[in-house]
Image (cartoon, rainbow, N blue to C red):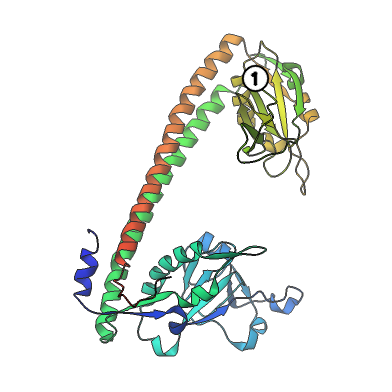
Amino acid sequence: MSNLSYLEKLLDGVEVEWKKLADVFQLKNGYTPSKSKKEFWENGTVPWFRMDDIRENGQILDGSLQKVSESAIKGGKLFSENSIIIATSATIGEHALIRVPFLANQRFTNLSLKPGYKDTFNSKFIFYYCFILADWCKKNTTMSSFASVDMDGFKKFPFPIPCPNNPEKSLAIQAEIVRILDAFTTMTAELTAELTAELNMRKKQYNYYRDQLLSFEDGEVEWKALGDVCESITSGKNKDKSETGKFPVYGSTGVIGRTNIKAYEIEQILVARVGANAGRVNIASGEYDVSDNTLILKLKTKYNLKFLYYYLVNLNLNRFVKGAGQPLLTAGQLKTMVIPVPTPEEQSRIVSILDNFDSITNSINEGLPREIELRQKQYEYYRDLLLSFPKSDTTEVL
């Protein structure tokens, strides 16, 4: 399939008519029934769609994770089956084809065909063309307290009708495009699942060997409190951060900004101490600073920093975090933690093996996700190619 050749052959010179989105679809906002009225949420039978439904079950949906009662329906009217929901705020552009009568929350704008166009379109064709609409939405947002789509432009978005004067042929063209895209979708999904399974298997294999190398029997090695292995365990300090500073600033998720104030030059282990990432372990090196949500473990010179790093990662420090609202891992907790201290030679041997495993795994981690990404981009390329209908000089391009 090269350039527009296939689409041109499919259209075979027929006209493509362009209509404004608001001329073809009834546009209505979703809503959330009042949470204070229990009767809206008990014994629900009406599908009520949220972003979670798309994330968990895909973009063609026959049922929702959550249902509301019929008394929650405004004006007694549901959104019609075979409609599109598209996020026009927050996670902009995410969309789905809904096969049943339904409601949706306020994040979504619902697109239902107007009566005069119900026999004009294949619902799956609309669904696929909404990927083009989604790209437009992401590029045309307005900012207030949160991002939202420019709805004036949204209503004017041009929507194609191939061969408008011959409805039967128009539907046949749409059906052929749907058939090809369905096949591409299935093929891409199967390949992605296969690559993802391979990636997960490699990760499990690496974790297994790391567990074996870092498991020690009683009496096999010396055990010491982490506070005795470290010269100090202290938290960083807040500094002014920017995107243009000279030195990276490490926080709970890794590098979180940059600063022009250098605090450290030696390689050290960092452990996130607060928040959702509490317990996460990093290694910092070069010239850098550390924020106050992170603990700095400065080792005594006779201990192998990389060995301790691998051991703490494998230990999963997050399981020692306390507190629900603001999870916390303290320096005091780390200091009393007992860790194995093999001989320097054994530490070096283990580090050498794990470095090798880590290198192999990282190359796989980089390779397989990259392959998955390339397959997805290839799919999107051909999908957009099949939906790139010719525009006349008078077609309004937004």
Where in the figure is residue 177, as x and y percent of width and height? 29, 70
Residue extending farthest to the front is 393
Where in the figure is residue 106, as x and y percent of width and height? 62, 72
In the image, what residue type sits under mark 1? Ile
Q: In the image, what residue occupies the spot 43% across and 40% down?
A: 199
Where in the figure is residue 133, as x and y percent of width and height? 44, 68
Instruction: Specify the quadrant that holds the N terminus.
Output: bottom left
Q: How many marks?
A: 1
Q: Can residue 343 be spotted in the picture?
A: yes
Q: Please indicate whether residue 389 sits to the left or right of residue 2 in the image.
A: right
Q: Name the one closer to the observer, 332 or 288.
A: 288
Q: Secondary structure at mark 1?
A: loop
Q: In the image, what residue occupies the spot 40% across and 38% down?
A: 367
Q: Which quadrant of the structure image shows residue 302?
A: top right
Q: In the image, what residue occupies the spot 55% across and 14% down?
A: 348
Q: Please indicate whether residue 366 sits to the left or right of residue 343 in the image.
A: left
Q: Name the one closer to the observer, 120 or 255.
A: 255
Vertical relation: 201 (above or below) 161: above
The residue pinned by badge 1 equals 266
Q: In the image, what residue occupies the spot 39% across and 50% down?
A: 192
Q: Name the one closer to the observer, 14 or 365.
A: 14
Where in the figure is residue 68, as x and y percent of width and height? 64, 76
Q: Can residue 61 be spotted in the picture?
A: no
Instruction: Specify the quadrant that holds the C terminus.
Output: bottom left
